[in-house]
Amino acid sequence: GAVVSQHPSWVICKSGTSVKIECRSLDFQATTMFWYRQFPKQSLMLMATSNEGSKATYEQGVEKDKFLINHASLTLSTLTVTSAHPEDSSFYICSAWTGAYEQYFGPGTRLTVT
Amino acid sequence: AQKVTQAQTEISVVEKEDVTLDCVYETRDTTYYLFWYKQPPSGELVFLIRRNSFDEQNEISGRYSWNFQKSTSSFNFTITASQVVDSAVYFCALSEENRDDKIIFGKGTRLHILP
């Protein structure tokens, strides 16, 4: 099946700094990718839809200036958490559609803000 | 409104028992897709099944089976002869064709298989 990778798999940063998370589709092109956030023992919450070559679409309640999404190519979307705070600590997961109506999820990135 | 309800927050069963995880969904669309995912402690989502709204046939894959009933808007998942390795969080999810293919997840059911 298709493979989606995320980098880094885990990151620790200090409060106030910015962190970039990459999501790559390794063997297919993805015009649309999605970013989810999962707090401990909770479900995945959709944050935004990342569209190649255009602005991301954010879900209600998600701060677009805090969570910057860039989908610069058909195989790469990045999520930058700006001015991170401890409450941003979470598990971030991306997913990508192959175009054959199959969606694949990345392995996730665990962010800890100290 | 698009909604997925997994009423069972946590279930514990003894190994080799059968267990059914419930999923009830809400949608106004006639074309939609239902999913089940497994999330082991590592965190990586494992795709189990996708079923479209026009296919109500039940499916069996090894010890796993799914019962899709549109009349009750349910898509239940049964594990037969459970094993310790089945311990994980299981998510039921829904996507609608006219909603940009977003997958909306239920809150998940944490399954403990006791040896």
Image (cartoon, rainbow, N blue to C red):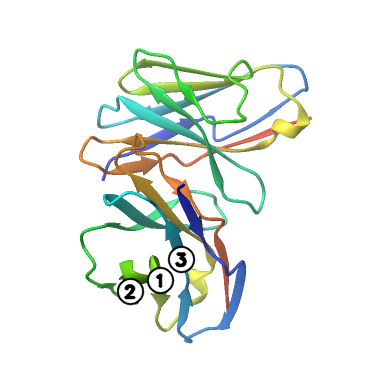
For label 1, the residue is B77
Mark 1 secondary-structure assignment: strand
Q: Earlier in the sequence, mark 3 or mark 1?
A: 3
Mark 3 secondary-structure assignment: loop
For label 2, the residue is B65
| Chain bearing mark 2 | B
Mark 2 secondary-structure assignment: strand
* Disc marking residue B23: 3
* Callout 1 crowding tier (Cα within 10 Å): few <14, some 14–19, many ≥20: many
Q: Earlier in the sequence, mark 2 or mark 1?
A: 2
Residue B58 against residue A18 in the figure, above or below: below
Question: Answer yes or no: do the residues labelled 3 and 1 have beta carbons within 8 Å?
Answer: yes
From the image, state whether disc 2 or disc 3 is nearer to you.
3
Please identify the quadrant where the C terminus of chain A is shown: top right
* Disc marking residue B31: none
How far is mark 3 from mark 1, CA to CA? 8 Å
Q: Nearer the viewer, residue A102 or A48?
A: A48
How far is mark 2 from mark 1, CA to CA? 6 Å
From the image, state whether disc 3 or disc 1 is nearer to you.
3
| Same-chain status of marks 2 and 3 | yes
| Chain bearing mark 3 | B
- Side of A27 relative to B86 (left or right): left
Q: Amino acid at mark 2?
A: Ser
| Same-chain status of marks 3 and 1 | yes
Please name the residue shown 33% across and 39% down the image: A3
